[in-house]
Image: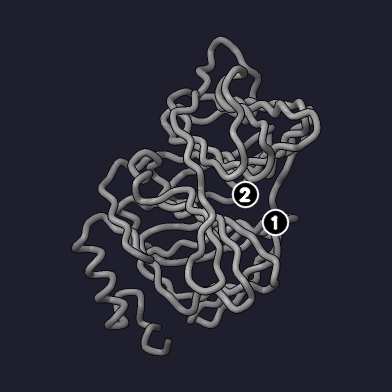
Amino acid sequence: MSASCDSDRVTRQVIKNVLAKLQKEGEGALVRNGITEIHQALLDPFVLLVDFSFSLTAGFADHPHRGFESVTYMLKGGIIHKYLKGNESTIKAGDVQWMTAGRGIIHSEFPEEEVNNGLQLWINLPSIHRMIEPKNLELSSLEIPRAEKDGVEVKVIAGDSLGIKSPYYTTTPIMFLDFTLKPGSQTHQTVPESWTAFAYILEGDEGVFGSLNSLAIQAHYVVVFGPGDLVSVWNKSTSRALRFLLIAGEPIGEPLVQCGPFVMSSQDEIDMAFEDYRNAKNGFELAKSS
């Protein structure tokens, strides 16, 4: 939950900033990769963070996943998810989709509207849970709890803040908070001391993280925090709001190999995932009809 600074708390300082550069991917897709392979060890249990937008002619046709969970959070427009099992859902601005790929899932993702923007976060699974049964859950914007106090608004997608909790729990424990700070406001969010924590700035250019005398960090940066149990953020702007995601999770501390749509514990397991998909078995039986 959110807390004020006190002598018993250790404020996490910023140890790394990473600019998620805008780049083209395929035909009609624009992405910012906030977490890539080179950051996976530092940001365990998180595997990927992608800030994306598609043209109406773009998207991803049927493709497989295995070995992780994902959170898709829409900021603008909508994305249509279709599963080979016959399920179809559309998540719109403010909505969230949780997907557990587990032993295997096959789906497609296409934009519903010309103007769209969303974020997708991949979360690693412990090896003992990699092959659990797949599932997915959508939460509409109205179902996401939120609170506001002293110029700070927070949407609690996972975890808790300002005395409210998310109704959803991931297999790997995480915190996923969407903060908006009005000009001149500040927030001090407790985070379990043993967890990895980072922020991704969505809007604003005068956000200060870690300590009040730090340099401001602009939008589209990933801000990685060091050890401690408190994340402190100030909006020094006198005219613009600061919006950022605060994401934290319990490290798994196991080997991780990510290749394309699969996240496994070894290269042999990656090879097996590709073989299972090609042969439509062990979770990918529906691939025969795709």
Is 269 in front, or is 181?
181
Q: Quick one: SS at disc 1? A: loop
Earlier-in-chain disc, 2 versus 1: 1
Q: Quick one: SS at disc 2? A: loop
Q: Compared with residue 49, is residue 42 higher up or lower down, i.e. above or below?
A: above
Q: Residue under label 1, please give it.
A: 94
> Where residue 121 sits: x, y (%)?
50, 53
> Where residue 180 sits: x, y (%)?
71, 39
Can you see residue 149?
Answer: no
Q: Compared with residue 241, is residue 234 higher up or lower down, i.e. above or below?
A: above
Residue 16 in which image quadrant = top left
Colouring of the image: one colour
Residue 74 in which image quadrant = bottom right
Is 34 in front, or is 190?
34
Q: Compared with residue 111, is residue 126 higher up or lower down, i.e. above or below?
A: above
Neighbourhood count class around disc 2 (C-alpha, 10 Å): few under 14, some 14–19, many 20 upward:
some
Q: In which quadrant will I find the C terminus? A: bottom left
Of all residues shown, which one is farthest toward the top? 7
Kind of residue sitting beneath label 1: Gly
Image point (54%, 55%), residue name? 22
Image point (51%, 64%), residue name? 24
Which dot, 2 or 1, sits closer to the camera?
1
Neighbourhood count class around disc 1 (C-alpha, 10 Å): few under 14, some 14–19, many 20 upward:
some
> Where residue 139 sits: x, y (%)?
65, 59
Q: Residue under label 2, please give it.
A: 167
Can you see residue 94?
Answer: yes
Kind of residue sitting beneath label 2: Pro
Residue 276 in which image quadrant = bottom left
